[in-house]
Image: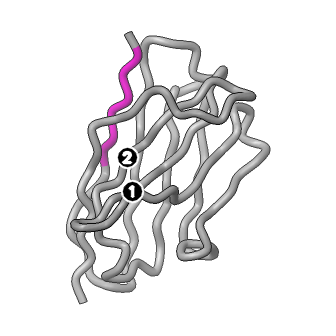
């Protein structure tokens, strides 16, 4: 059974930084592409960032480009999201998700971690 467990969320002032982590168990981590999504109250879930199974390819939503960095450590079965220069509009529940490499649909999801940015 696959489990994705996020951590690292919290309350931070605007301009601050947080680093989210997502640990995966139950499958071969290196066989999966990974993504971070977020959902703010009253809004639809949006894709924040993705990273390929081998870590070579990454992508970011325009709203976070230049501020967020996604990375993965296949030895630790963990994906990270470094979030710098945080803005109040980054406030949301952040979820990590996994998709089998070469496929586009995310099939496994974590439970989410709250990020709150105060102005």
The answer to whether residue 55 is magenta is no
Q: Residues within 10 Å of mark 2 (few under 14, many from 20)?
A: many
Seen in the picture, residue 101 relative to 88 is either above or below; the reply is above
- Residue range in magenta is 2-7
State yes or no: discs 1 and 2 in contact (Cβ < 8 Å).
yes
Left-right relation of 113 to 60: left
User: Which secondary structure dominates the residues rendered in magenta?
Assistant: strand
Q: Which mark is residue 45?
A: 1
Quick one: label 1 or label 2, which is nearer the N terminus? Answer: 1
Q: Residue at x 68, y 57 (%)?
A: 59
Residue 4 among magenta residues: yes
Hey, which quadrant is residue 102 in on the image?
top right
Look at the picture and state if 22 lies above or below 74.
below
> Which residue is at a point 29% across and 45% down the rendered structure image?
112
Which corner quadrant holds the C terminus? Answer: bottom left
- Residue placed furthest toward the right: 56
Disc nearest the viewer among 1 and 2: 1
Identify the residue at image location x=51%, y=56%. 47
Residue displayed at 55% across by 74% down: 67
Out of 43 and 8, give the one closest to the viewer: 43
Which dot marks residue 88?
Answer: none
Q: Position of residue 11 (x, y in %)?
A: 21, 69
Residue 107 position, x and y percent, is 49, 27
Q: According to the image, label 2 marks what residue? A: 95
């Amino acid at each position: 059974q696959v489990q994705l467990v996020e951590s690292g969320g919290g309350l931070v002032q605007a301009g601050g930084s947080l680093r989210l982590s997502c640990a995966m168990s139950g499958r071969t981590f290196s066989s999966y592409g990974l993504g971070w999504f977020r959902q703010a109250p009253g809004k639809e879930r949006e894709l924040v960032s993705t990273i390929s199974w081998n870590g070579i390819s990454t992508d970011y939503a325009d709203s976070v480009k230049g501020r967020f960095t996604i990375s993965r450590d296949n030895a630790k079965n963990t994906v990270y999201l470094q979030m710098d220069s945080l803005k109040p509009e980054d406030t949301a529940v952040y979820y990590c998700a996994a998709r089998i490499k070469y496929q586009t649909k995310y099939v496994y999801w974590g439970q989410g971690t709250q990020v709150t940015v105060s102005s």
